[in-house]
């Protein structure tokens, strides 16, 4: 059972995380607001440059966080049965990591004012929350049918 859950969390977390990254990548390419760069930025971690600036490691670290978030929503909502609510609350709170992440980032992908980048960041994370809520609801229905 746990192996199946981990596999499902990894599968759906990867899909949700990839779609969030794509959303920010389109904004970055289309409008020059470097939200994708900001999303995968890990240059504040005390790691060697060849790790910090590796595209693969940056992207995988983002996916790992997505998998953890979907697991957290799944576990909480299995007990309280509100996957969309938990997902929106968790991701709304996570959206505010924008400010400390910007502060700690060595490479600043954009400069103040932050109204537009933060608004787009918040919208992206709310879309991500809806997607996670949908995936977790699907997982609950699938488990109850089994």
Image (cartoon, rainbow, N blue to C red):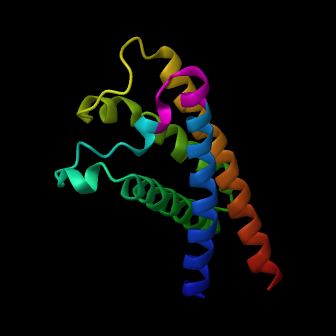
Q: Is residue 71 above or below residue 118?
A: below
| Residue farthest to the top, as pictured | 113
- Residue 29 in percent (x, y) is at 57, 29
Q: 44 or 88, which is in the foreground?
A: 44
- Residue 86 in percent (x, y) is at 60, 51
- Residue 10 in percent (x, y) is at 56, 70
| Residue farthest to the right, as pictured | 145
Q: 67 or 33, which is in the foreground?
A: 33
| Image label count | 0
Q: 143 or 78, which is in the foreground?
A: 143
Quarter of the image that includes the C terminus:
bottom right
- Residue 35 in percent (x, y) is at 48, 32
Magenta stretch bounds: 27-36
Q: Is residue 136 above or below residue 16?
A: below
Left or right placement of residue 134 versus residue 28 in this view: right
Q: Main secondary structure of the magenta part?
A: helix
* Residue at x-position 47% and y-position 62%: 68
* Residue at x-position 59% and y-position 78%: 7
Left or right placement of residue 47 versus residue 28 in this view: left
* Residue at x-position 55% and y-position 85%: 2
| Residue 3 is inside the magenta segment | no
Quarter of the image that includes the N terminus:
bottom right
Left or right placement of residue 14 versus residue 65 in this view: right
Left or right placement of residue 132 versus residue 37 in this view: right
Residue 138, image quadrant: bottom right
* Residue at x-position 79% and y-position 71%: 141
């Amino acid at each position: 059972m746990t192996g199946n859950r981990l596999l499902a969390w990894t599968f759906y977390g990867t899909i949700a995380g990839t779609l969030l990254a794509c959303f920010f990548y389109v904004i970055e390419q289309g409008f020059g607001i470097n939200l994708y760069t900001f999303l995968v930025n890990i240059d504040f971690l005390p790691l060697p440059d060849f790790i910090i600036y590796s595209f693969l490691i940056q992207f995988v670290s983002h996916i790992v966080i997505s998998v953890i978030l979907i697991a957290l929503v799944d576990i909480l909502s299995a007990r309280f049965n509100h996957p969309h609510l938990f997902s929106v609350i968790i991701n709304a709170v996570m959206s505010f990591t924008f400010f400390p992440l910007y502060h700690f980032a060595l490479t600043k992908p954009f400069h103040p004012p932050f109204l537009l980048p933060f608004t787009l960041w918040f919208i992206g994370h709310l879309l991500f929350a809806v997607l996670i809520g949908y995936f977790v609801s699907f997982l609950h229905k699938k488990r109850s049918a089994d």
